[in-house]
Amino acid sequence: MTASNSTILSVSELNLKARKVLERDVGEVWVEGELSNVSRPASGHVYFTLKDDRAQIRCALFRQRARFVSAPMRDGDQVKLRGRVSLFEPRGDYQLIAEAVQAAGLGELLAAFERLKAQLEGEGVFANARPLPFPPRKLLILSSATGAAIRDVLAVLEARWPLADVTLIPVPVQGAEAAPAMISALALLNRQARLDPERDVILITRGGGSLEDLWAFNNEHLARAIFHSRLPVMSAVGHEVDVTLADFAADMRAPTPSAAAERLVPDQTALKRQLEHQHSRLQRAMQARLERDSQRLDTLRAKLRHPGEQLNRQRQYVTTLSQRLERAMQQTLTQQKAQMTQLSRRLASQDMARLHRAESERVNQLNRRLSSAMQRQLESQQARLKAAARELNAISPLAVLGRGYAIAQDEQGQVIRRAEDTQPGQKLKLRLGEGRLSVEVKRRFK
């Protein structure tokens, strides 16, 4: 077959056909293998190679799916991957588009954990967040009596707060019997009336281990028992990276057993240092207060005088004021007498009859001047009034009417100024110089 009589494809068309064949015929698959060349660019996507001892395939986990993957995805990790086979057309790269990634061997347990976590969270089992008493009156520990966790807890408690009243309730922390034993212990403690939720705390703890070792703490019934506990519960299971359903259901989680002990009780060494610091501050404050009060007492003592001295000073002051008052009164009386004498002499020297005649003549003269001014003002105002009347009469419409003119108005009282403003047969009123007329328009003239 020659090129002239066969269909010739471009490279992009060939890759497109190959991609469609792969996606249609292979579709979505589960593949298990080892991670290598894991790359996380700034875009948020994850690119890696999945391989076994005989083959490998390029893989891409896009950002929208990557945020739902809890597996750490490190080079060398064995994983199970669900994805769809495809082909990257621009380069012709055969690849697997990942939808989900699970750690191989632990995938089923992790999936069960996530399902149960979502169910309990939806029911509100993880809503507890009660404050824990600090320090607790009685600390009740559910743990193995021989494990490393209880030794770490007791060592920290002894170092930080030897006064702690600790009761160990030994329970298995691994295996099928662990969860029922812890549930029974929780029920027993919550039935004891002597235990007070405001002052007592339950600590559930164990050391680290694999996911299978810690699986008892992912028991659904244990999580519910912790949630319904009357006494507040702290959970400290495994290491910092280990998270169980018991941690979510508890009122507080600690990353390790030692950290739980540190959070439950204060540090006696720090408290002693704080107490010594406060004692030093108190001593310095008391010494400063004593010195201030002593100085104030010395100042007051220097100001203090015998009451007799104060009375003598007041007596002298009153005597001085009395003398000043007496002199002032005598001086004022002398001045008033001199003024009275002077006024009496001035009054005696005046001729009252002559003063009366002079004032009467002055009043008469003022009356004559007032009458003359009033007459002149009246004549001036009358002249102004006559002049205004003449001017008003000259411009008055009534004066115009008196010369033979008339004012025409329609029935509404509007003045008719032009013949065009009337119609034949229209009734008009004429105002004359004397009287009024009612007329009818017969014809208009321009």
Image (cartoon, helix red, strand yellow):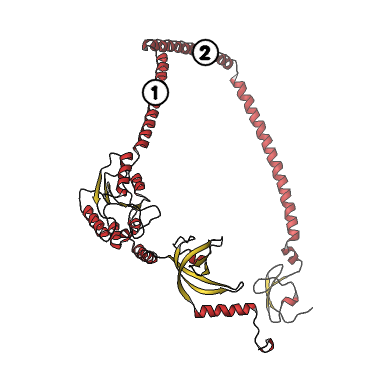
- Say if 256 sits above or below 282 in the image: below
Q: Is residue 230 above or below residue 365?
A: below
Give the class, few, some or many, for how many residues have Cα within 10 Å of label 1's Cα (few <14, many ≥20).
few
Identified at 46% across, 74% down, the residue is: 29
What percent of the width, then of the height, locates residue 356?
60, 24
Q: Given contact means CB atoms under 8 Å apart, are the residues at marks 1 and 2 in contact? A: no
Image side of residue 381 versus residue 298, left or right:
right
Task: Residue 12: give x, y in percent of width and height.
Answer: 63, 77
Q: Which mark is residue 335?
A: none
* Mark 2 element type: helix
Mark 2, residue position = 337
* SS type, badge 1: helix
In percent of the image, x 24 and y 51: which residue is there?
170
Residue 240 rendering spot, x and y as whole percentages: 39, 52
Query: Mark 1 or mark 2: which is in front?
Result: 1
Residue holding disc 1 = 287
Of the residues shown, which amino acid type is indicated by label 2? Lys
Nearer to us in this view, 296 or 279: 279
Picture quarter with the N terminus: bottom right
Disc 1 from disc 2: Cα separation = 72 Å
Q: Say whether disc 1 or disc 2 marks the residue closer to the N-terminus.
A: 1
Q: Nearer the viewer, residue 340 or 136?
A: 136
Number of residues whose C-alpha sits closer than 10 Å to that of mark 2, classed few (under 14), some (14–19) or many (20 or more): few
Circle 1: residue type: Gln
Indicate the quadrant containing the C terminus: top left, top right, bottom left or bottom right: bottom right
